[in-house]
Amino acid sequence: MLGISGSEFLVLLILVAAVIGPDSVVKALKGFKSGVESLRHWSAKLREETKGDMPHAEMPEVNLPTFNLDDYDPREIIRRAVREEMTEWVDEVAKSNAQSKNVVVDPAQSAEEASQGSSPADSQGPSNDGNQGAQRDPVNQA
């Protein structure tokens, strides 16, 4: 307790009793007792006030066998969000490509194709626009 051993504490109590006198020791103990009682009363009052202010602040039950900390890993949360956004983006692109070519595309199929690196246009073969094999130069287009 405060770096003081039991024997040192006893010596300090005897010195305090000798300094303040035997009559004052009784008054000091009564004052100490009333101070401790008022502190306990204040603490109990504070506990009751806070308990009344927060009736719904109880912690929810946590089922530890099924609790998975990976669900709260920021890296995993970001990965899931990016994966969802990419899936939605691929589906939108596949639908817009299908609408422009009047082809019905299954969104699950487009997600698989996107993960494999191909698009629905790649699987339809070469285009018949007369420029097969020719490379287009965006700067020199006329």
Image (cartoon, helix red, strand yellow):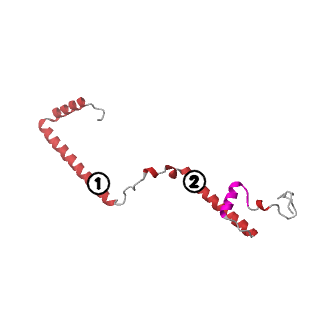
> Where is residue 101, by image quadrant?
bottom right
- Which residue type carries mark 2? Ile
At 29% from the left and 54% from the top, the residue drawn is 47
**Where residue 94 sits: x, y (%)?**
70, 64
In primary-sequence order, the first of circles 2 and 1 is 1
Find the distance from the CA under tag 2 to the CA under tag 1: 41 Å
Residue of label 1? 47
- Name the disc covering residue 36, or none: none
At 17% from the left and 41% from the top, the residue drawn is 29
> Image check: 60 left or right of 99?
left
Task: Decide whether residue 108 is among the magenta residues.
Answer: yes
Element on which disc 1 rests:
helix
**Where residue 113 sits: x, y (%)?**
70, 58
- Which residue type carries mark 1? Arg
Q: Quadrant of the C terminus?
A: bottom right
Comparing labels 2 and 1, the label whose residue is closer to the camera: 2
115 and 79: which one is in front? 115
Residue of label 2? 78
At 18% from the left and 44% from the top, the residue drawn is 31
71 and 75: which one is in front? 71
84 and 2: which one is in front? 84
Element on which disc 2 rests:
helix
* Main secondary structure type of the part rendered in magenta: helix
> Where is residue 1, by image quadrant?
top left
Residues rendered magenta in the picture: 107-119
